[in-house]
Image (cartoon, rainbow, N blue to C red):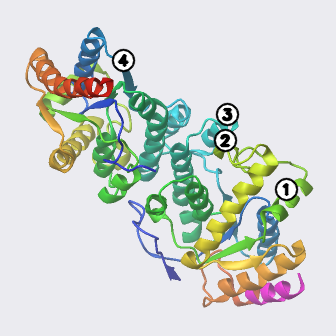
């Protein structure tokens, strides 16, 4: 079991102790296919007998709805947005992520603190300030960064998905371009740069997301199998047995 | 992002702080009346008043969803919205902003609830440093009596019942308010709070407050005169 480690000031009232689960983060900018990969991973792990909790930004009971309403109205100031996201994150960390990790789950999270940091920094927030706020975050067992090379490629993905450009994903609040497309390209370029900068700092494992979905998925499975297997077998409920791990290895090759 | 102590605006920001029942809101509204009657443009900003966050806070209180960390962060979100919407724009325009409770309320409450002192201060680093921060200091028993007579029942978080300090709400409230008062006392030097003895008659307190505020208003008028030349 791994000892809990926080980036900065640990969450108040949390007992720092070893936990049997695994915290796996899938990061990447808008349109790289994170949610597709998360759902493929989930199916794969569950079929191998791992209990999985998946979570992602704005899914907290406490602040999820408030953030969505505020985003819909396009009325969020920059500092307010940062802190609203941090509230959402803290609620999920305390009420979903930590309890699941203690119970031996694999927690798969679609984005973690890095997207929030990138968004804040490109909007001019003090990088030290945001990092200090997210000091309460648990250091994950692994972070996979799905990377596309260019903002144009991202735009193509967004269009192909049929959902079109979103106000916030296009950074329309920043006044970077005359229309959604120009703004999207300019904004996503800034984000990509920021992610590249964080890659070394936070030890991202970079996954080339320009490959076909299946190949990205099999790459992720191979890497994740290693993270999960890196532990001796335990009898804890929800924790993988040797047989389950062998099963997982097998599936990682074929799947 | 401009951090605490580094904003340079032509306006003035006066804030009142103190435990519940210290009389600070009464004093602030008297100050407001006076400044209005003197012809200043005055804006009022209250703790917990962001329309963006209000529903979330209300629901969280009702359903008891808060932990000390999320309580702290959601209040910081509320405060950030106030700062961006109600505080910075009028200060830039050269107006006077009066704030009923400011960041020191969060520092006192959140630290009393067990949040890390340095972390909470870091979270609020974006706040504008007030021109003057008044701390109305009333002895604990006086404040508690005032609260008890004004409100029939204490609310869950207000009484600190989420912390399991005591079995009954009155005992819990006293413990909580005691911790808060300790934090305020630490902050007097740290942030240079201006202490007003909340035990004095209301008019005496108001006179002291106006005397201090007027020093900064004169200075402001001088600045205007210089600009006019």
Q: Are marks 4 and 3 on the same chain?
A: no
> Which chain letter matches label 4?
B
Q: Are marks 2 and 3 on the same chain?
A: yes
Q: Main SS of the magenta segment?
A: helix
Whether the residues at callouts 3 and 1 have beta carbons within 8 Å, the answer is: no
Residue pointed to by mark 1: A158
Q: Is residue B78 visible?
A: yes
Nearer to us: label 2 or label 3 = 3
Nearer to us: label 4 or label 3 = 4
Residue B164 location in percent, x, y? Answer: 33, 49
The CA distance from mark 1 to mark 2 is: 20 Å
Quadrant of the image containing the C terminus of chain A:
bottom right
Q: Which mark is residue A73?
A: 3
Please say if B67 is above or below B206: below
Residue A202 location in percent, x, y? Answer: 56, 75
Q: Work out whether residue A34 or residue B70 is closer to the camera in this orientation and state it.
A: A34
Q: Which mark is residue B41?
A: 4
Q: Earlier in the sequence, mark 2 or mark 3?
A: 2
Q: Is residue B18 visible?
A: no
> Which chain letter matches label 3?
A
Please say if A253 is above or below B17: below
Q: Earlier in the sequence, mark 3 or mark 1?
A: 3
Q: Which residues are magenta?
A: A245-255
Residue pointed to by mark 2: A68
């Amino acid at each position: 079991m791994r000892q809990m480690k926080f980036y900065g000031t640990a969450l108040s009232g949390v007992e720092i102790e070893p936990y049997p689960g695994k915290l796996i983060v899938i990061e990447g900018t808008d349109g790289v296919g994170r949610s597709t990969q998360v759902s493929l991973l989930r199916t794969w792990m569950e079929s191998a007998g791992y209990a999985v909790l998946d979570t992602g930004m704005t899914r907290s009971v406490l602040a999820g709805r408030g953030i969505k309403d505020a985003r819909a109205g396009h009325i969020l100031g920059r500092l307010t947005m940062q802190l609203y996201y941090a509230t959402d994150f803290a609620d999920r960390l305390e009420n979903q992520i930590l309890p699941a990790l203690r119970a031996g789950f694999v927690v798969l999270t679609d984005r973690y603190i890095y997207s929030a940091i990138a968004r804040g920094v490109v909007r001019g927030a003090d990088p030290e300030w945001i990092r200090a706020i997210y000091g309460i975050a648990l250091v994950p067992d692994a972070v996979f960064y799905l990377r596309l090379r260019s903002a144009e490629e991202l735009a193509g993905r967004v269009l192909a998905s049929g959902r079109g450009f979103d106000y916030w994903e296009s950074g329309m609040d920043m006044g970077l371009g005359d229309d959604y497309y120009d703004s999207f390209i300019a904004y996503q370029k800034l984000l990509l740069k920021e992610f590249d900068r964080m890659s070394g700092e936070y030890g991202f494992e970079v996954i080339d997301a320009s490959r076909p979905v299946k190949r990205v998925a099999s790459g992720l499975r191979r890497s994740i199998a290693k993270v999960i297997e890196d532990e001796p077998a335990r009898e804890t409920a929800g924790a993988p047995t040797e047989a389950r791990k062998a099963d997982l290895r097998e599936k990682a090759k074929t799947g | 992002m401009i951090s605490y102590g580094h904003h340079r605006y032509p306006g003035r920001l006066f804030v009142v702080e103190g435990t519940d029942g210290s009389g600070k809101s009464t004093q602030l509204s008297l100050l407001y009346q006076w400044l209005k009657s003197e012809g200043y443009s005055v804006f009022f900003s209250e703790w917990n008043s962001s329309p963006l966050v209000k529903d979330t806070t209300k629901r969280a209180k009702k359903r008891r969803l808060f932990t000390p960390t999320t309580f702290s962060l959601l209040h910081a979100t509320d405060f950030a919205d106030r700062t961006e919407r109600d505080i910075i724009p009028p200060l830039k325009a050269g107006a006077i902003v009066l704030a009923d409770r400011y960041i020191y309320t969060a520092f006192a409450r959140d630290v009393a609830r067990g949040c890390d002192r340095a972390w909470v201060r870091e979270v609020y680093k974006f706040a504008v440093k007030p021109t003057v921060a008044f701390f109305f200091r009333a002895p604990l028993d006086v404040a508690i009596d005032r609260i008890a007579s004004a409100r029939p029942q204490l609310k869950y978080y207000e009484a600190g019942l989420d912390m399991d300090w005591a079995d009954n709400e009155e005992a819990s409230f006293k413990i909580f308010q005691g911790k808060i008062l300790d934090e305020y006392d630490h902050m007097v030097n740290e942030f240079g709070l201006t202490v007003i003895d909340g035990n004095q008659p209301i008019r005496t307190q108001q006179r002291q407050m106006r005397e201090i505020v007027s020093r900064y208003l004169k200075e402001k008028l001088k600045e205007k005169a210089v600009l006019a030349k």
